[in-house]
Image (cartoon, rainbow, N blue to C red):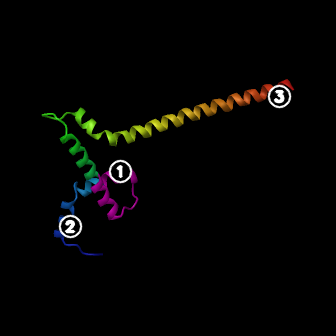
Amino acid sequence: MIFIPEEKKATEDEELPFPNARVVKLIRKHTGKTMLKKRVKVEMNKLLGKICEDIAERMAKMPYAYLTYAEFLEAAKPYLRVELSKQKKKKIIATLNKIKEEAATMAMELEEEIEEET
């Protein structure tokens, strides 16, 4: 095991935008006991920091004396649209599967009618 002085650990954590332990806890919530390389933890932390900075910069450009939740939603829209897009795709897939099932049922009924006619 490599010994890293406490000073170096503290410096590394200070360079990250969020407490690394909290970010790791959020990742583990979904990955369970899967092992995570240090780089994954650090890069996730940096990515979250960049997203936070981007949203903050968008809000800073708004011409208001104070910012409300509505302004936050407007600034975060590019990131929220991704989730909406996923939801829309899932809904379309579910609709297409339903249509496919109905088409298969109709095809079977027609085949049965054809067999009965012959």
Q: Is residue 92 above or below residue 18?
A: above
| Rendered image quadrant of residue 98 | top right
Q: Label 3's element?
A: helix
- N-terminal label among 2 and 1: 2
Q: Residue 78: image x %, image y %?
A: 33, 41
Quadrant assignment, res 104: top right
Residue mark closest to the camera, 1 vs 3:
3
Residue 10 in the image, given as x and y percentages of width and height: 18, 64
Vertical position of residue 16 compared to residue 2: above or below: above
Q: Is residue 40 magenta?
A: yes
The magenta segment: 24-47
Q: CA distance from mark 2 to mark 1?
A: 24 Å
Mark 3 lies on residue: 115
Is mark 2 in CB contact (under 8 Å) with mark 1? no
Residue under circle 2?
A: 9
- Packing grade of label 3 (10 A; few <14, some 14-19, many >=20) is few
Which residue shows up at 28% across the image and 40% down it? 76
Pointer 1 with pointer 3, Cβ within 8 A:
no
- View extreme (right): residue: 118
Residue at numbered disc 1: 29
Quarter of the picture holding the C terminus? top right
Q: Is residue 22 left or right of residue 37?
A: left
Circle 1 residues within 10 Å: few <14, some 14–19, many ≥20:
few
Question: What amino acid type should be assigned to the residue bearing mark 1?
Answer: Lys
**Mark 2 or mark 1, which is nearer to you?**
2
